[in-house]
Image (cartoon, rainbow, N blue to C red):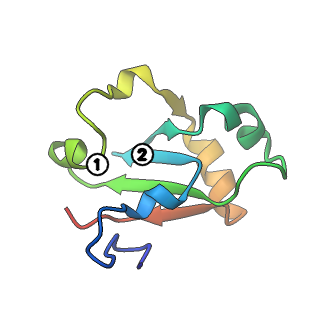
Amino acid sequence: MDMNTGEGDGGSEKPWDRYEIVIVSMNQRFWLWRGDAYLQRMLRGESDVPWPIGCVVIDDPRKLNRVVPDDVDLGDLWMINAMAMANMRSEERVVDIYPEL
């Protein structure tokens, strides 16, 4: 499966399903969608976190519901600071996923 495009073998598995920690990115904002149990350790950069993190990049807010289920409200998720994301990216701990929607 190509993690940059989200294209796979046509099965029901999504490219972000292989990550224990998944962040949704939209308009340079970041929300922790999956992996709440790792939040504090992830932000501290601890080694026992299941790195890398999958970051699903949504380029159009109207496409959000094609990735995140309707019953998930971004306002209920932990927001991740952009500087924290930049630090994790600089350490190559984030894999951006650009799904074909």
Q: Residue at x 46, y 56 (%)?
A: 17
Foreground: disc 2 or disc 1: 1
Q: Amino acid at mark 2?
A: Val
Q: Residue at x 58, y 47 (%)?
A: 21
Left or right of 36 in this view: 79 = left
Residue 88 in view here = yes
Quarter of image, res 83: top right
Q: Give coordinates of residue 51: x percent, y percent.
A: 69, 58
Q: Is residue 101 above or below residue 74?
A: below
Left or right of 44 in this view: 81 = left
Q: Amino acid at mark 1?
A: Val
Comparing 43 with 70, the one in front is 70
Q: Residue at x 31, y 75 (%)?
A: 7
Mark number, residue 24: 2
Estimate how packed mark 1 is, as few (under 14), some (14 to 19) or many (20 or more) residues with alpha carbons within 10 Å.
some
Mark number, residue 12: none
Residue farthest toward the front in the current orientation of the protein: 11
Distance between the Cα atoms at labels 2 and 1? 9 Å
Q: Are marks 2 and 1 in contact (CB under 8 Å)?
A: yes
Mark with earlier residue (2, 1): 2
Estimate how packed mark 2 is, as few (under 14), some (14 to 19) or many (20 or more) residues with alpha carbons within 10 Å.
many
Q: Give coordinates of residue 85: x percent, y percent.
A: 60, 48
Pick the quarter of the image with the N terminus.
bottom left
Quarter of image, res 95: bottom right
Q: Secondary structure at mark 1?
A: loop
The residue that mark 1 highlights is 67
